[in-house]
């Protein structure tokens, strides 16, 4: 079988950027004739202000975490998920706790060291990983953010978990049309990059196995589906002025549809080998403006709810918000798990974390952080159970383990005391 020049295909006829999904024809080891493992993907999802604890963490001794009200949406992929308890961060007293929660969540700064910022910030985990693996993909890293607020009343620290260094934010993309443009538009032609790539693909398709033809068809079908949604959205905004009000009802997407589309774009980026590193903010930390949760049929301040969760009606509403975000996260995992790749699925060849910088949104503690890791990292992570760590185990231990799994060669990360014990299978 003739091998195609994958890099030539990556950039297409008009210089656009689009990679191929994992295909057998370029994954075969020339010496052993066996399929090599696909590259490992890393993503970190952030949910603000913690979770209602007794709906998230099971009682000690109970390993059935999928029966917890907030985590039930994960049941379909439960065997590929790990709940981790006991992880903590150092809260630097005297500075705003919420600003620390998000901006320092993936930080590589030692909270007990000399800081170059009011907060323990430095180059974040995603960029340290991208430094080592970005040569594999056309896009170095992808920073996605589902913050729809138009007001600028809150600080930049609350709206970003990805930083190039202290006070040097990695600007996130909030508009799905802009995400699509970055992933699939040429920048040199009005023609969609998918049209150009399909033209290229027709030149060598006769050399593809039936498996690889199916993979290409699956991938392009997914891209076309997103194209249609983006086109519909663009047509709407061509004839409708964007109102200045927050979460306007007349926008064509509900909150869930918006986050769901951003999630589909992330899946396509991983499926097509466009990038292997991503961060995804489900919502900003603390933003006090009331938010419209269309699917839940109410407008509430998520932050405000966390401070009144002693009331049963408030706790119920807050738990609905928590579950809402977990449901959307679970949909991304299910999509990844539905895509066959090598001897497993795209989820098997990924390491996807969902977490928050606060352990308790009411008391502003950073102990017992809610952390879920999905995917086995090519079979190296033990999944389908609860990993109970000793109290006050540094969150940086998990980040160090993930950095090592991604091949960075790091031996220390921030205030880590070593790789997270019990994580690997």
Image (cartoon, rainbow, N blue to C red):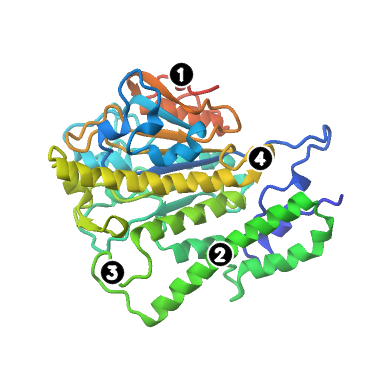
Q: Residue furthest right?
A: 1
Q: Which residue is mark 1?
A: 421
Mark 3 → mark 1, Cα distance in angstroms: 48 Å
Q: Which residue is mark 4?
A: 38
* Left or right relative to 391: residue 333: right
**Residue 175 horizontal/vertical position (percent):** 41, 63
Q: Which residue is mark 2?
A: 225
* Left or right relative to 258: residue 179: right
SS at circle 2: helix
Q: Which residue lies at the image location 55% right of the left edge and 32% below the top edge? A: 376
Mark 4 → mark 3, Cα distance in angstroms: 42 Å
Count neighbours of disc 3 (C-alpha within 10 A) and say few if under 14, some if 14 to 19, many if 20 or more.
few
Q: Which residue lies at the image location 51% right of the left edge and 45% below the top edge? A: 334
Mark 4 → mark 1, Cα distance in angstroms: 25 Å
The quadrant where residue 312 appears: top left
Q: Earlier in the sequence, mark 2 or mark 1?
A: 2
Q: Which residue occupies the foreground of this view, 94 or 247?
A: 247
Q: Please tell me whether residue 279 is drawn above or below residue 310 in the rendered image.
A: below
Q: Which residue occupies the foreground of this view, 4 or 56?
A: 56
Mark 4 → mark 2, Cα distance in angstroms: 25 Å
Q: Which residue is mark 3?
A: 249
* Marks 4 and 2 close (CB-CB < 8 Å): no
């Amino acid at each position: 079988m003739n091998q195609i020049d994958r890099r030539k295909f990556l950039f297409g006829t008009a210089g656009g950027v689009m990679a191929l999904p994992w295909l057998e024809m370029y994954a075969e080891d020339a010496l052993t004739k066996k399929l090599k493992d696909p590259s490992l993907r890393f993503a970190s999802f952030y949910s603000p202000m913690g979770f209602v604890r007794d709906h998230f963490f099971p009682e000690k001794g109970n390993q059935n975490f999928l029966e917890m009200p907030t985590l039930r949406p994960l049941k379909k992929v439960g065997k590929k998920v790990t709940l981790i308890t006991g992880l903590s961060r150092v809260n630097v007293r005297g500075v705003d706790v919420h600003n620390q929660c998000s901006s320092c969540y993936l930080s590589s700064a030692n909270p007990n060291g000399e800081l170059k910022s009011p907060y323990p910030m430095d180059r974040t985990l995603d960029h340290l990983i991208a430094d080592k693996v970005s040569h594999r993909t056309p896009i170095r890293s992808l920073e996605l953010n589902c913050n729809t607020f138009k007001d600028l009343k809150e600080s930049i620290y609350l709206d970003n978990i990805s930083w190039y260094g202290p006070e040097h934010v990695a600007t996130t993309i909030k508009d799905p049309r802009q995400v699509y443009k970055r992933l699939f538009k040429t920048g040199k032609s009005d023609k969609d990059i998918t049209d150009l790539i399909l033209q290229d693909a027709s030149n060598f398709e006769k050399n593809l196995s039936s498996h690889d033809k199916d993979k290409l068809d699956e991938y392009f079908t997914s891209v076309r589906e997103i194209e249609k949604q983006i086109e519909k959205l663009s047509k709407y905004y061509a004839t409708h002025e964007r109102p200045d009000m927050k979460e306007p009802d007349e926008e064509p997407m509900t909150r869930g549809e918006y986050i769901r589309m951003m999630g589909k774009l992330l899946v396509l980026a991983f499926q097509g080998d466009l990038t292997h590193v991503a961060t995804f903010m489900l919502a900003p930390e603390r933003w006090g403006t009331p938010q419209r949760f269309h699917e839940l049929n109410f407008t509430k301040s998520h932050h405000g709810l966390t401070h009144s969760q002693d009331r049963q009606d408030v706790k119920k509403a807050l738990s609905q918000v928590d579950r809402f975000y977990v449901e959307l996260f679970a949909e991304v995992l299910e999509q990844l798990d539905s895509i066959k790749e090598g001897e497993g699925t795209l989820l098997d060849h990924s390491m996807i974390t969902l977490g928050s910088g606060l352990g308790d949104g009411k008391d502003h503690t950073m102990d017992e952080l809610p952390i879920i890791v999905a995917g086995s990292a090519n079979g190296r992570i033990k999944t389908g159970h609860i990993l109970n760590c000793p109290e006050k185990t540094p969150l940086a231990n998990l980040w160090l383990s993930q950095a090592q799994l991604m091949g960075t060669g790091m031996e220390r990360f921030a205030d880590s005391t070593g790789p997270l014990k019990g994580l690997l299978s």
